[in-house]
Image (cartoon, rainbow, N blue to C red):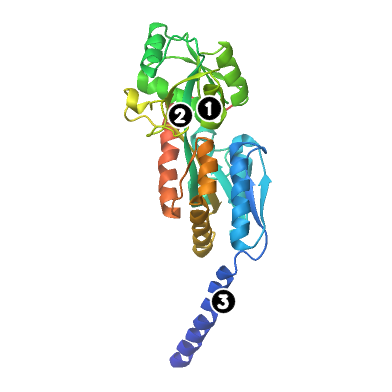
Amino acid sequence: MFKTLAIALAATAAFTSPLLSHADDKYPSKPVKIIVPYAPGGPNDIVARLLASKLGEIEKQSFIVENKPGGGSNIGADFVAKAPADGYTLLIAATSHAINMSLFPKEQLKYDLLKDLAPVSMIMTGPLVLVTRPDFPANNLKELVAAAKAKPGELSFASSGNGSSTHLGGEMLNSVAGIKTIHVPYKGSGPGLTDVMGGQTTYMLDTMISATPFVTSGKLKALAVTGRKRSAVLPNVPTVAEQGYPDFEAVAFIGMMAPAATPKPIVDKINADMQKILAMPEIKDKLAAQGFTAEWMKPADFGSYLAKEVPKWGAIVKSANVKVD
């Protein structure tokens, strides 16, 4: 009897395993949704559409970008976290999602970035750039810090919104430099930069894509970039680390994630496609032109990166007592 049962189980396993592998091999057999938890037109949306086009060419299948903005980027992330874990719903994740884990009360968050979503690949990283108006007397970070210490609480910095990376980057600088400046939140980069140019606020740490055109046109001057290395877009602008704060790094990222239980063969297949795409010169050049660096990672490495980002930003949220609007 036991011999008969063993033979039956072996036959079942031999029959079932190829079917499971075959199902993974056929992925994708229908259109794939790429959820962007932001409005159309921003960096996340632009990157998603670039990737969707290339993924479609590689896989001979439609990859459709769908925007689900709202809730500080949480609505789209929660949608993907609760989607079927079959590889047909993917998320464009960003720095805001790592920040949100500490920024929003637990009762408001309906998903956990590290538990309910699976890392697929990093896509790109990019530093912020500290800009001020051309006639502001500080011409480097040391002089800005000295001005802030001379007049505690009088200088102000703009951000693209309360709890954004541009806000927390400013709070991080306050912390490491030992200065006190006033945060002024705006509804997006544009209004914040406009008021920096007009002198209503003193400076802003903003994304390269938003701030660089004003730097190159002479409407703003750049005092520092917040990555470990200088940016190829503004190679003459030193990093914060170079200017006396060696441990400082405030880098925005964009990556791709999937529902947590998505089969590993599917995650690995998308990851392999991403490796090909992010190595393409045209993609690297398009990202570099906007101040970003194409940066592919294996799923496990991207997961490790996220596991460090969440507490790093959480510490700033706590120390600066940042509250969501």
Badge 2 amino acid: Leu
Q: Quadrant of residue 188?
A: top right
Mark found first going from the N terminus, 3 or 1: 3
| 138 versus 311 height, above or below | above
Q: Residue at x 67, y 59 (%)?
A: 31
* 32 w.r.t. 162: above or below: below
The amino acid type of the residue labelled 3 equals Leu
Residue drawn where x is 37% and y is 29% of the image: 248
Residue 306 location in percent, x, y? 44, 44
Q: Position of residue 187 (x, y in %)?
A: 63, 24
> Circle 1 sits on which residue?
212
Q: Residues within 10 Å of mark 3 (few under 14, many from 20)?
A: few
Mark 3 — residue? 19
Check whether the beta carbons of the residues at disc 1 and disc 2 lie within 8 A of each other.
yes
CB of mark 3 within 8 Å of CB of mark 2?
no
Q: Secondary structure at mark 3?
A: helix
Residue at 49 percent across and 9 percent down: it is: 135
Distance from the alpha carbon under mark 3 to that under mark 1:
52 Å
Tag shown at residue 72:
none
